[in-house]
Image (cartoon, rainbow, N blue to C red):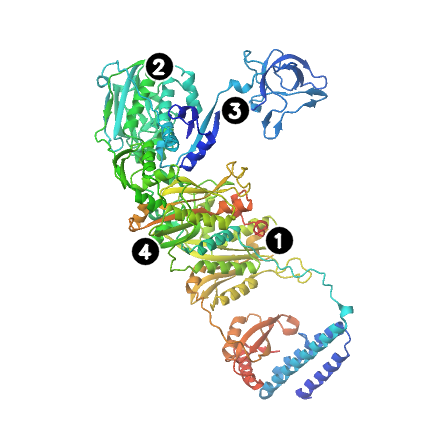
Amino acid sequence: MSIKSTIDDLQRQFDEACENASDLISLEEIKNKYLGRKGKVAGLFSLMGEIPPETRKEVGQQLNVLKNQLTDHLQTKLNELTGKDEKKHRMDYSLPGYPVVAGSRHPLTQAIDDMLSIFKRLGFDIAYGPEVETDWFNFESLNFPPNHPARDMQDTFYVEGGGILRTHTSPVQTRYMTTHEPPVRIVAPGRVYRNEAISARSYCLFNQIEGLYIDTDITFADLKGIIELFCRMYYGKDVKIRFRTSYFPFTEPSAEVDVSCILCGGKGCRVCKNTGWLEILGCGMVDPNVLKAVEYDTEKYTGYAFGLGVERMVMMRLGINDIRLLYENDMAFLRQF
Amino acid sequence: MIVSIDWLKDYVDFEDVPLEELAEQLTLAGLECELKVSGISIPEGVVVGKVLERSAHPNADKLSICTVDVGEDKPLNIVCGAPNVDKGQTVPVAVIGAQLAPDFIIKKSKLRGVESCGMICAEDELGLGGDHAGIMVLPDDYKAGSPFSDYFRSFKVLDIDVTPNRPDVMSHWGVVREISALTGNPVKFKKITLKEDGPDVNTLVKVSVDAPEGCPRYTARLIQDVKVGPSPQWLRDRVEAVGLRSINNVVDAANYVLMETGHPLHTFDFDKLNGHEIKVRFAEDKEKFTTLDHKDRELNSSTLMICDADHPVAIAGIMGGLDSEVEDDTKNILIESAYFEPSVIRKASKKEQLSTDASKRYERGTDPNETLQYAQDRLAEMICDLAGGILAKGMIDVYPQPIGKHNVPLRYEYVKRVTGIDIPAETCKRTMKALGFRIVKDAPASMTVEVPSFRPDVEREIDLVEEVLRVGYMDKIPSMKKLTMSVSEEYDEFHPFITDVRSFFVGLGFCEALNNSMVNRATAEAGIWGYDPLTVLNPLSKEMDTLRTDVSQSLLGSLKSNSLKKRPTIKLFELGNVIQKNTHVETNAEEHYNMALVACAPMWQNSWLAKDGSADFFYLKGILTSFLGRLNFSFRLKENTNRPEFDILYDVMVRKQVVGKIGQYKMDHFEKLQLEHPVAIMELELGKLYNWYNPKKHYKPIPQFPSISRDISVVLDRETKVNPLMNEIHQNGGKYLVDLSVYDLYIDDKKLGDNKKALSFRLEFRSDEKTLTEDEISGVMDKIFKQLINKYGAQLR
């Protein structure tokens, strides 16, 4: 029997069987019998090796055509049957679907994104710096002289080879300014490290976002404006803001910024230790010594800088009372965000 | 720093300001402070009682029933469990309503059937100490019914968090000046009157300074025939109010002057100074010395010492020695008031790990001039008043190169330029004067002030701007409502890139993790890139003494902790820096920004739809293909056989460079965890990919013509790798082959024969110009068949 007639026979048998099928189960049997992995069509394909090479091409084409036709016919019949037998064969659609579980973003990187998008709206570019820093960028260029007690404010990790783990994102200020002329308007997110015992309230590393704007005619009022805008965009329009004089070597004058406690609204509670205020960031006018360190003209340019700790703000917002949870990566924790 | 409200009131009036408001104003001005009560605070409702009667409890051996007079008409019935309670005792009684702890309020109660109307207290119940052995028994002269708190002293104080730039406010005087500036009320400092009735001090004491670089000024006074004894009550109150312990009149006086002026002083027992001599010099290396805290120390040459003729008697500016301490039988006292170089004191304090009231002030910078002199005189005056004694005439003052004062100008226009507001010149002047600055030049547009030497933090015009701003103006600066700004012409694209990457993996069901960058050495050395790790020289613990060299090991740590908690699905990713030691980088640290992924999870968890299968290597391989495809990178996998812990590990090659790793661990690598699924990982150098990434996309015309698909099924030797076959098909597939997939893999020794496998490919052909015909495809298919048969021994099925 020629291959051609085998193919024709097979097609005839199939069409007949298909027409006679009255339910989905018999159709499924037909499908397996003809089109299954060990079905009749596959059987024909497996004979290809025995066919003389000169006709092999032709036969291959015919087999492919056959396969397509059977598949189409089967589908047509299937559509017909599922329509006709709807009541008898209806699926139980109350069964649950595929357990598709979405992943989640870490609450810290989410918060960083939220904050950066606010600062982007306010016209800041994003800049970066290394985590292993030189003493010059981390301290000296920022007006921390060697052997100065201000260095005690930031307990430092020292690394083999002369570097230190940056204690704040402020070195990005001087890094950026050494390669860019004013005006400079950047925010810099990143990890910083402090050599402090790990507890519910402090971890050996955390994330900061640094802000810097250097230009002509920049005043403390500009700083206050941008900080207020940021706080209102992040915490909501009703938030109250307070500037307190403080000290950072790289800003003068310096201030710390408190927002009205987001839990009690300023009435006083355990989170704000009954003060009604929560400290969220440090800021100030860039100290002329910093501008000198990067060879900017201190009579021409002024500017402001600020730095905020992301962990603290996230913990306050989400009601997390142990910072270590943020670095434990328990799936049960991460899935919540 | 704790300052006493009463003490401050000696020097400035602030009766008209409520204390809470004062604390708020000081806080805004830079002295972050909290109003507190120091000393002992006894809860309200605790009164003195007299035990009139005591009888045994009828129903309990250890309890007794007491009748206690608490000054009211009727005595109280109180059941008490203390073994030592007895008739006739005077005791503290917590009456009904007294709150001894947040969750402990005294109520009327019945104890084993007998009513009790209060509690007789033990020490620990009142927060007075740890003693719970029995109730407190008080002196008989305590009056029944009087509040127990009447017998304790408490003081209103401000607890100030002093910033390191302000040594001057580590004293009552400093705070007084701040209050004066804030309220406008004048400062009233005391004048000192000294009676120098003794012989000339120079005939009694010799002082020499061999290290003027460490000790620019050293002064000494001598008081003879003092009587060391207990301090009077007012002095005890003062020192205790600021948190010190009263010791004796001389030591208390020295502490008093320290807390008042901020200038540290030291008193020596003069008779214990060999040769009646003081020498200031740096220590010799390995010189031994025992400090007042009974610690034996070995010094080095950076530590400045105060010595007598033969040996050291104090570590300069930090702590005195045990051998020259003023004791009860001390007769003659030498007072030291000196100025030490801040960095010298700081170095020694760090080296000795010894931080004292004195060292904290010296290392921040004390006043070498007026305050130093004043403190010296004030202490001499106080000791003479309190301990008798005759003050020697004059003061030894070794001050070879007096430290001068400097003048700083302040332009009002500059004040505005920095702050954004006009602060009136008169206000500026008033503030500067109140803070102790002397106006040496007063011009219409500017002034020049002489900076007092107690303000080492003020050197420049900008520092003066801060002074005029912080005193009352911090909350008056308006916040700019209209933004004017220069917008940067640069625009960061990295952050949007990584945000997008994160979203991609979140969409695939991965949770984002963040891990410590400090790991133990073994973890850093096991890093998947094989980088040489960098050590942290002063780690918090051995577990964190090295910087991580990859993100994967961090994620494996998270995997372990999650599997111990039996979390069923563990799919994590993390983005972060890893560090490679590279001596060509200034800090020796080359940073790589990486992304890693770990999966140990079922493909579908607990579903009737799909029961089998793990999110394994092939899952990650699919993710990798899709991820890199999305970024428009073609890649190649190169097997990496260097890691025995892996079943399979590949280097991910892009542009002929290794940019990633992907693999699956051997199950026994995590034997102890008894995991149900294999652990697959992937790590990419995201920073490098970003640098190569071209975000520009070009539209490609949408296919207009239908595609034709063809299947090929072949039987191959089991060992034959599929990837070369697929490459072969691609190479021979011609320009119309647009997609190739493997849709079946089949192994059956009976049907296929030993060591064989059957593979089925589906090929998709399409042209952008026309509908393809059979003829156009069949030639290509023939070519493919031929190659597979000839090159790979494939049998067609």
- Counting residues from the start of the chain, the first of labels 1 and 2 encountered is 2
Q: Are marks 4 and 1 on the same chain?
A: no
Label 1 marks a residue whose chain is B
Q: Is residue B769 above or below residue A118?
A: below
- Counting residues from the start of the chain, the first of labels 3 and 2 encountered is 3
Q: Residues within 10 Å of mark 3 (few under 14, many from 20)?
A: some
- The secondary structure type at the circle numbered 2 is helix
- Counting residues from the start of the chain, the first of labels 3 and 1 encountered is 3
- The secondary structure type at the circle numbered 3 is loop
How far apart, in angstroms, are the residues tagged by discs 3 and 1? 54 Å
Which residue is denoted by mark 3 in the rendering? Answer: B41
Left/right placement of residue A288 relative to residue A42 reads left
Q: Residues within 10 Å of mark 2 (few under 14, many from 20)?
A: many
Q: x and y percent of residue B608 in the render?
A: 69, 61
Q: Is residue B657 above or below residue A299?
A: below
Label 4 marks a residue whose chain is A
Q: Amino acid at mark 3?
A: Ser
Q: Is residue B413 among the parts visible in the rendering?
A: yes
How far apart, in angstroms, are the residues tagged by discs 1 and 2? 77 Å
Q: Is residue B525 above or below residue B147?
A: below
Left/right placement of residue B257 relative to residue B598 reads left
Which residue is denoted by mark 4 in the rendering? Answer: A181
- The secondary structure type at the circle numbered 4 is loop
Label 2 marks a residue whose chain is B
Which residue is denoted by mark 2 in the rendering? Answer: B387
